[in-house]
């Protein structure tokens, strides 16, 4: 029962029942990426969409599929792949909000020691503000 309600009312747990019905009735499968995400287009229309394999996270869409979804290319990567570049690196997941996220030096999560500043900066202190009045 809980799975049904999640599928009915939440989009972040996969496609909703409405998306599933729309895909079944009006969708045409175009392809899959290496992550297992499935891409569709409307049979008689111009809509394009993705059904994620697992967590709904936009950063999991490869650049070539992203270009097709946003109408930057007319043909999907299964018909006309984007040319690769020498400088391109493999995709990395968005780690924001996880324990593996990057924290800049000086942040509390990275040790809390801010690098010393040079010269013209004087930190505000509440007592110093009271003394001026």
Image: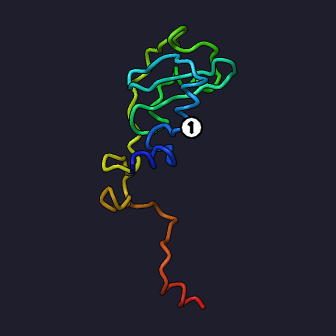
Examine the image and state in which quarter residue 117 appears.
Answer: bottom left
Instruction: Choose between 52 and 84: the one closer to the eye.
Output: 52
Q: Is residue 86 shown above or below 91?
A: above
Instruction: Choose between 47 and 112: the one closer to the eye.
Output: 47
Secondary structure of the residue carrying numbered label 1: helix
Bin the neighbour count of mark 1 within 10 Å (Cα to Cα): few under 14, some 14-19, many 20 and up: few
Please, which colouring scheme is shown?
A: rainbow
Residue 30 position, x and y percent, is 53, 16
Q: Is residue 7 shown above or below 25?
A: below
Residue 23 position, x and y percent, is 55, 27
Kindly identify which residue carries mark 1.
Answer: 18
Q: Residue at x 52, y 20 (%)?
A: 64
Quadrant where the image shows the C terminus: bottom right
User: Of all residues shown, which one is farthest toward the top?
Assistant: 79
Residue 130 position, x and y percent, is 54, 89
Numbered label tally? 1
User: Of all residues shown, which one is farthest toward the front?
Assistant: 1
Q: Residue at x 40, y 31 (%)?
A: 53
Q: Residue at x 54, y 85 (%)?
A: 129
Residue 43 position, x and y percent, is 63, 17
Q: Is residue 44 left or right of residue 126?
A: right
């Amino acid at each position: 029962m809980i799975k049904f309600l999640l599928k009915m009312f939440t989009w972040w747990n996969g496609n909703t029942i409405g998306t599933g019905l729309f895909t079944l009735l009006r969708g045409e499968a175009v392809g899959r990426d290496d992550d297992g995400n499935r891409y569709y287009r409307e049979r008689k229309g111009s809509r394009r969409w993705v059904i994620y394999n697992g967590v709904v996270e936009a950063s999991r869409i490869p650049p070539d599929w992203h270009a097709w979804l946003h109408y930057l290319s007319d043909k999907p990567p299964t018909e006309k792949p984007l040319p690769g570049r020498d400088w391109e690196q493999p995709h990395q997941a968005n780690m924001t909000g996880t324990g593996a996220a990057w924290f800049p030096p000086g942040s509390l999560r990275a040790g809390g020691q801010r690098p010393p500043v040079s010269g013209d900066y004087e930190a505000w202190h509440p007592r110093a503000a009271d003394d001026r009045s």
